Amino acid sequence: MKAHILVVDDDPRIIELQRRILAYEGYSVATAATGGEALARMLERPPDLVILDVMLPDLDGFEVTRRLRAAGDTVPILLVTARDAVADRVHGLKTGADDYLVKPFAPEELLARVEAALRRAQPERNEVLRYADVELDTGTRIAHRGGREIELSPTEYELLTLFLRRPRQVLTRDIIMDRVWGLDFEGSSNVMEVYIGYLRAKLEAEGESRLIHTIRGVGYVFKEV
């Protein structure tokens, strides 16, 4: 059996559509129509992924995400909404969501986002990656810079892993999007820039030198200067 996914939406037609798409691919699917019901469902059977609509009749998707992250729950969350404003996308990511999908969407896009989110959450074989004064234990997913421990979200972990596996190499936007998100975004989304900013802030939280450098018009490089 593939992963267990919780779909949360107050529109029965959308719930049924997503349930059919996911079930056809072999996923186990549970559903909820409100934020409160979603939280209850998660206690009954913790999902491997939550597909969460933002506009819900009680707790909206942002609040559900915030509560889960505040409680230490790291389940991957894919926010779904009809809103397409950049500010809403950024707000969703800041609350702790792993990705953002705007309605209407094609079944292929939904499945690709689901597969990418689940792949990012899968544990890897235990290995310690090092560059400069940064190290990352892929077994515990804990990073250190110098003697300082750095707590990473699943997406930040994937980004840092990619950079540590390919230090001093210029990584294009397409390469980063493909390796971390598993999709070729058309450039209108600033998801990558948002998470690069998060990771930079954590790596430089105590005034350390910058390691993630922007190559304007190309992408990023992880190196000491």
Image (cartoon, rainbow, N blue to C red):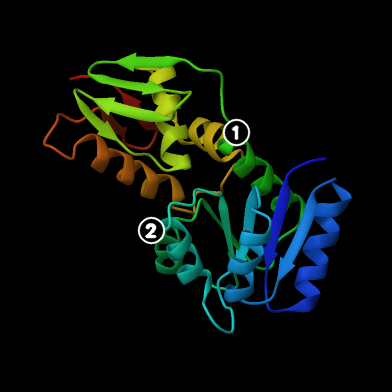
Left or right relative to 74: residue 56: right
Q: Which residue is drawn at 67% across and 60% down?
A: 44
Quadrant for residue 132, please give it. Answer: top left
* SS under mark 2: helix
Instruction: Reply above or below: 223 against 81.
Output: above
- In the depicted view, which residue is nearer to us: 108 or 48? 48
- In the depicted view, which residue is nearer to us: 87 or 10? 10
Residue 85 seen by the camera = no
Label 1 vs label 2, nearer the camera? 1
Quadrant for residue 112, please give it. Answer: top right
- In the depicted view, which residue is nearer to us: 11 or 224? 11
Amino acid type for the residue under numbered disc 1: Gln
Left or right relative to 199: residue 155: right
- In the depicted view, which residue is nearer to us: 9 or 180? 9
Q: Which residue is drawn at 64% across and 53% down?
A: 46
- The residue beneath circle 2 is 94
Q: Residue furthest front?
A: 44
Residue 199 seen by the camera = yes
Q: Which residue lies furthest to the bottom in this view?
A: 57
- The residue beneath circle 1 is 122
Q: Residue furthest left?
A: 207
Mark 1 and mark 2 lie on one chain; the one further toward the N terminus is 2
Q: Residue at x 30, y 15 (%)?
A: 131
Instruction: Reply above or below: 57 against 1.
Output: below
Left or right relative to 119: residue 107: right
For mark 2, does the 10 Å Cα neighbourhood hold few (<14), some (14 to 19), or many (20 or more) residues?
A: some
Amino acid type for the residue under numbered disc 2: Lys
For mark 1, does the 10 Å Cα neighbourhood hold few (<14), some (14 to 19), or many (20 or more) residues?
A: few
Q: Position of residue 2 (x, y in %)?
A: 78, 41
Q: Position of residue 200 (x, y in %)?
A: 27, 39
Question: Which quarter of the image is occupied by the C terminus?
Answer: top left
